[in-house]
Amino acid sequence: MKTILLLLFFSIGTFVSIAQDINIKEIVKQADEKFRGTSSTGEMTMIIQRPMWSREVTMKNWTLGNEFSMIYITAPAKEKGQVFLKRHNEMWNWVPSIERMIKIPPSMMMQSWMGSDFTNDDLVRESSLVKDYEQRLVGEETINGYECYKVELIPYDDAPVVWGKIIMWISKEEYHWLKAEYYDEDNYLVNTEVLSEIKQMDDRKIPTHLEMIPADDEGNKTILIFKEINFNVNLKESFFSQQNMRRIR
Protein backbone atom coordinates (compact mmCIF):
# COMPACT_ATOMS: atom_id res chain seq x y z
CA MET A 1 0.00 0.00 0.00
CA LYS A 2 2.85 2.36 0.87
CA THR A 3 4.44 1.73 -2.56
CA ILE A 4 1.16 2.46 -4.36
CA LEU A 5 0.70 5.69 -2.42
CA LEU A 6 4.26 6.76 -3.25
CA LEU A 7 3.72 6.03 -6.95
CA LEU A 8 0.46 7.97 -6.88
CA PHE A 9 2.12 10.88 -5.11
CA PHE A 10 4.98 11.07 -7.61
CA SER A 11 2.66 10.73 -10.63
CA ILE A 12 0.48 13.57 -9.35
CA GLY A 13 3.55 15.65 -8.63
CA THR A 14 4.91 15.03 -12.12
CA PHE A 15 1.59 16.06 -13.73
CA VAL A 16 1.46 19.26 -11.65
CA SER A 17 5.03 20.05 -12.72
CA ILE A 18 4.14 19.49 -16.40
CA ALA A 19 0.99 21.61 -16.07
CA GLN A 20 3.02 24.47 -14.62
CA ASP A 21 5.34 24.41 -17.65
CA ILE A 22 2.48 24.63 -20.16
CA ASN A 23 0.87 27.93 -21.14
CA ILE A 24 -2.59 26.44 -21.42
CA LYS A 25 -4.25 29.81 -22.13
CA GLU A 26 -2.05 30.23 -25.21
CA ILE A 27 -2.85 26.67 -26.36
CA VAL A 28 -6.61 27.33 -26.10
CA LYS A 29 -6.13 30.62 -27.94
CA GLN A 30 -4.24 28.98 -30.81
CA ALA A 31 -6.75 26.12 -31.10
CA ASP A 32 -9.63 28.60 -31.27
CA GLU A 33 -7.91 30.98 -33.70
CA LYS A 34 -7.08 28.14 -36.11
CA PHE A 35 -10.69 28.35 -37.30
CA ARG A 36 -10.74 32.08 -37.96
CA GLY A 37 -7.28 33.63 -38.30
CA THR A 38 -7.33 37.43 -38.15
CA SER A 39 -10.19 37.18 -40.69
CA SER A 40 -11.78 34.51 -42.86
CA THR A 41 -14.37 33.64 -45.48
CA GLY A 42 -15.83 30.21 -46.06
CA GLU A 43 -18.58 27.88 -47.19
CA MET A 44 -20.22 25.28 -44.95
CA THR A 45 -22.92 22.64 -45.00
CA MET A 46 -25.00 21.87 -41.91
CA ILE A 47 -26.90 18.57 -41.66
CA ILE A 48 -29.54 18.31 -38.95
CA GLN A 49 -30.22 14.65 -38.13
CA ARG A 50 -33.23 13.36 -36.22
CA PRO A 51 -34.44 9.77 -35.71
CA MET A 52 -37.16 10.16 -38.38
CA TRP A 53 -35.78 12.82 -40.72
CA SER A 54 -32.82 15.01 -41.68
CA ARG A 55 -32.36 18.30 -43.50
CA GLU A 56 -29.44 20.19 -44.99
CA VAL A 57 -28.56 23.88 -44.87
CA THR A 58 -25.71 25.47 -46.83
CA MET A 59 -24.17 28.83 -46.00
CA LYS A 60 -21.36 31.32 -46.50
CA ASN A 61 -19.60 33.02 -43.62
CA TRP A 62 -17.23 35.91 -42.96
CA THR A 63 -15.32 36.67 -39.76
CA LEU A 64 -13.06 39.44 -38.49
CA GLY A 65 -11.30 38.62 -35.26
CA ASN A 66 -13.58 37.54 -32.42
CA GLU A 67 -15.85 40.58 -32.59
CA PHE A 68 -17.40 40.44 -36.07
CA SER A 69 -19.05 37.64 -38.03
CA MET A 70 -21.72 37.24 -40.71
CA ILE A 71 -23.52 34.14 -42.01
CA TYR A 72 -25.54 34.07 -45.25
CA ILE A 73 -27.88 31.12 -45.89
CA THR A 74 -27.67 29.87 -49.50
CA ALA A 75 -30.05 26.85 -49.27
CA PRO A 76 -32.70 25.51 -48.92
CA ALA A 77 -34.94 27.91 -50.82
CA LYS A 78 -37.21 28.49 -47.82
CA GLU A 79 -34.36 29.97 -45.76
CA LYS A 80 -32.19 31.32 -48.58
CA GLY A 81 -31.19 34.93 -48.06
CA GLN A 82 -31.38 34.93 -44.27
CA VAL A 83 -28.38 36.66 -42.73
CA PHE A 84 -26.99 36.55 -39.20
CA LEU A 85 -24.68 39.31 -38.01
CA LYS A 86 -22.56 39.64 -34.90
CA ARG A 87 -21.00 42.99 -34.00
CA HIS A 88 -19.23 42.98 -30.64
CA ASN A 89 -21.93 41.84 -28.18
CA GLU A 90 -24.92 42.31 -30.49
CA MET A 91 -26.49 39.76 -32.81
CA TRP A 92 -28.97 40.48 -35.62
CA ASN A 93 -31.01 38.40 -38.06
CA TRP A 94 -32.20 39.70 -41.45
CA VAL A 95 -35.27 37.81 -42.74
CA PRO A 96 -35.87 38.81 -46.40
CA SER A 97 -39.22 37.03 -46.72
CA ILE A 98 -40.77 39.51 -44.29
CA GLU A 99 -38.16 42.26 -44.87
CA ARG A 100 -37.50 42.46 -41.17
CA MET A 101 -34.35 43.00 -39.10
CA ILE A 102 -34.54 41.15 -35.78
CA LYS A 103 -32.23 41.78 -32.84
CA ILE A 104 -31.40 38.61 -30.91
CA PRO A 105 -31.11 39.45 -27.19
CA PRO A 106 -28.51 37.87 -24.87
CA SER A 107 -31.31 35.85 -23.26
CA MET A 108 -31.71 33.92 -26.54
CA MET A 109 -28.07 32.95 -27.01
CA MET A 110 -28.83 29.44 -25.69
CA GLN A 111 -31.72 29.02 -28.16
CA SER A 112 -31.39 26.54 -31.03
CA TRP A 113 -29.92 28.02 -34.22
CA MET A 114 -32.22 27.27 -37.19
CA GLY A 115 -33.61 24.16 -35.49
CA SER A 116 -30.18 22.57 -35.11
CA ASP A 117 -28.27 21.36 -32.05
CA PHE A 118 -26.10 24.47 -32.23
CA THR A 119 -27.00 27.48 -30.14
CA ASN A 120 -26.85 31.08 -31.35
CA ASP A 121 -23.69 31.43 -29.27
CA ASP A 122 -22.04 28.46 -31.00
CA LEU A 123 -22.40 30.01 -34.44
CA VAL A 124 -21.33 33.55 -33.65
CA ARG A 125 -19.33 32.91 -30.48
CA GLU A 126 -20.49 35.85 -28.44
CA SER A 127 -18.22 34.64 -25.64
CA SER A 128 -14.43 34.35 -25.84
CA LEU A 129 -12.77 31.13 -24.70
CA VAL A 130 -9.67 33.12 -23.75
CA LYS A 131 -11.11 36.29 -22.20
CA ASP A 132 -14.24 34.95 -20.50
CA TYR A 133 -12.94 31.68 -19.04
CA GLU A 134 -10.19 30.57 -16.71
CA GLN A 135 -8.30 27.66 -18.29
CA ARG A 136 -6.87 24.75 -16.30
CA LEU A 137 -5.06 21.63 -17.49
CA VAL A 138 -6.82 18.66 -15.86
CA GLY A 139 -5.35 15.69 -17.70
CA GLU A 140 -4.08 14.13 -20.89
CA GLU A 141 -5.98 11.68 -23.12
CA THR A 142 -5.79 10.19 -26.60
CA ILE A 143 -8.55 11.11 -29.09
CA ASN A 144 -8.61 9.26 -32.44
CA GLY A 145 -4.90 8.54 -32.18
CA TYR A 146 -3.95 12.12 -31.19
CA GLU A 147 -2.38 12.73 -27.78
CA CYS A 148 -4.37 15.60 -26.29
CA TYR A 149 -4.38 18.07 -23.45
CA LYS A 150 -7.64 17.91 -21.48
CA VAL A 151 -8.54 21.46 -20.47
CA GLU A 152 -11.25 22.70 -18.13
CA LEU A 153 -12.69 26.17 -18.76
CA ILE A 154 -14.60 27.86 -15.93
CA PRO A 155 -16.23 31.24 -16.64
CA TYR A 156 -15.25 34.29 -14.65
CA ASP A 157 -17.99 35.59 -12.36
CA ASP A 158 -18.79 38.64 -14.49
CA ALA A 159 -18.34 36.96 -17.90
CA PRO A 160 -21.29 37.20 -20.36
CA VAL A 161 -21.34 33.46 -21.14
CA VAL A 162 -24.00 30.77 -21.52
CA TRP A 163 -22.02 27.76 -20.27
CA GLY A 164 -21.24 26.85 -16.67
CA LYS A 165 -18.21 24.83 -17.74
CA ILE A 166 -16.46 23.60 -20.89
CA ILE A 167 -14.06 20.65 -21.16
CA MET A 168 -11.82 20.71 -24.25
CA TRP A 169 -9.45 18.19 -25.78
CA ILE A 170 -6.65 19.81 -27.82
CA SER A 171 -3.98 17.81 -29.64
CA LYS A 172 -0.43 18.30 -28.35
CA GLU A 173 0.86 18.61 -31.91
CA GLU A 174 -0.55 21.43 -34.04
CA TYR A 175 -3.16 22.24 -31.35
CA HIS A 176 -6.17 20.76 -33.13
CA TRP A 177 -9.46 21.20 -31.25
CA LEU A 178 -10.81 17.62 -31.33
CA LYS A 179 -13.55 17.44 -28.71
CA ALA A 180 -15.48 19.60 -26.27
CA GLU A 181 -18.16 19.03 -23.64
CA TYR A 182 -20.52 21.85 -22.68
CA TYR A 183 -22.12 21.94 -19.23
CA ASP A 184 -24.88 24.15 -17.84
CA GLU A 185 -24.70 26.16 -14.61
CA ASP A 186 -25.77 23.09 -12.61
CA ASN A 187 -22.86 21.07 -14.04
CA TYR A 188 -25.08 18.88 -16.24
CA LEU A 189 -23.71 17.87 -19.63
CA VAL A 190 -25.72 19.57 -22.42
CA ASN A 191 -23.76 18.98 -25.64
CA THR A 192 -20.72 17.05 -26.81
CA GLU A 193 -18.77 18.40 -29.79
CA VAL A 194 -16.58 16.03 -31.83
CA LEU A 195 -14.23 17.28 -34.56
CA SER A 196 -12.47 15.12 -37.15
CA GLU A 197 -11.27 14.81 -40.77
CA ILE A 198 -8.25 17.11 -40.54
CA LYS A 199 -7.51 18.61 -43.96
CA GLN A 200 -5.55 21.45 -45.50
CA MET A 201 -7.68 24.59 -45.67
CA ASP A 202 -5.85 27.52 -47.25
CA ASP A 203 -2.64 27.99 -45.22
CA ARG A 204 -3.34 25.53 -42.38
CA LYS A 205 -4.68 22.12 -41.42
CA ILE A 206 -7.89 22.05 -39.39
CA PRO A 207 -10.68 19.59 -38.55
CA THR A 208 -13.32 19.92 -41.27
CA HIS A 209 -16.08 17.68 -39.87
CA LEU A 210 -17.86 18.76 -36.69
CA GLU A 211 -20.64 16.92 -34.86
CA MET A 212 -22.73 18.48 -32.09
CA ILE A 213 -24.48 15.78 -30.05
CA PRO A 214 -27.05 16.70 -27.37
CA ALA A 215 -26.83 14.67 -24.17
CA ASP A 216 -30.57 14.30 -23.55
CA ASP A 217 -31.91 13.69 -27.09
CA GLU A 218 -30.93 10.21 -28.23
CA GLY A 219 -30.57 9.93 -31.99
CA ASN A 220 -30.22 13.69 -32.48
CA LYS A 221 -27.10 15.39 -33.79
CA THR A 222 -26.03 18.18 -36.10
CA ILE A 223 -23.09 17.89 -38.48
CA LEU A 224 -21.15 20.90 -39.77
CA ILE A 225 -18.87 20.31 -42.76
CA PHE A 226 -16.35 22.98 -43.74
CA LYS A 227 -16.21 22.99 -47.55
CA GLU A 228 -13.83 25.90 -48.11
CA ILE A 229 -12.10 28.47 -45.90
CA ASN A 230 -9.74 31.30 -46.81
CA PHE A 231 -7.88 32.97 -43.96
CA ASN A 232 -6.49 36.45 -43.37
CA VAL A 233 -8.53 37.99 -46.16
CA ASN A 234 -9.09 41.72 -46.69
CA LEU A 235 -12.17 42.54 -44.59
CA LYS A 236 -13.02 45.76 -42.77
CA GLU A 237 -15.35 46.43 -39.85
CA SER A 238 -17.65 48.38 -42.18
CA PHE A 239 -18.42 45.11 -44.03
CA PHE A 240 -20.26 43.86 -40.93
CA SER A 241 -23.19 46.26 -41.04
CA GLN A 242 -26.98 45.99 -41.09
CA GLN A 243 -26.97 47.70 -44.49
CA ASN A 244 -24.67 45.04 -45.90
CA MET A 245 -26.88 42.28 -44.48
CA ARG A 246 -29.51 43.27 -47.04
CA ARG A 247 -27.02 43.28 -49.94
CA ILE A 248 -24.75 40.34 -49.26
CA ARG A 249 -24.83 37.33 -51.59
Image (cartoon, rainbow, N blue to C red):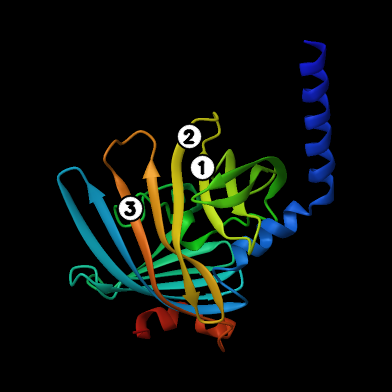
Q: In this view, does 195 lie to the left or right of 13?
A: left
Q: How crowded is mark 1: few (under 14 residues within 10 Å), some or many (20 or more)?
A: many
Circles 2 and 1: CB atoms closer than 8 Å:
yes
Residue 20 drawn above or below residue 28: above
Residue drawn at 46 percent across, 56 percent down: 195
- Which residue is farthest front? 3
Residue 181 drawn above or below residue 94: above
78 or 63: nearer the viewer: 63
95 or 8: nearer the viewer: 8
Q: Dividing the picture into quarters, in which one does residue 158 lie?
A: top right
Q: Name the residue under label 2.
A: 189
Q: How much space separates mark 1 and mark 3, taking CA atoms? A: 15 Å
Residue 17 drawn above or below residue 81: above
Q: Is residue 68 left or right of residue 26?
A: left
Q: Residue 181, which numbered label?
A: 1
Secondary structure under tag 3 reads: strand
Q: Quadrant of the C terminus?
A: bottom left
Which residue type does callout 3 highlight?
A: Thr
- Which residue is farthest left? 52
Q: Dividing the picture into quarters, in which one does residue 166 lie?
A: top right
Q: How much space separates mark 3 and mark 2, taking CA atoms? A: 17 Å
Residue drawn at 44 percent across, 42 percent down: 191
Q: Name the residue under label 3.
A: 222
Residue 35: % across, % down: 54, 68
Residue 104: % across, % down: 43, 58
Q: Is residue 220 left or right of residue 64?
A: left
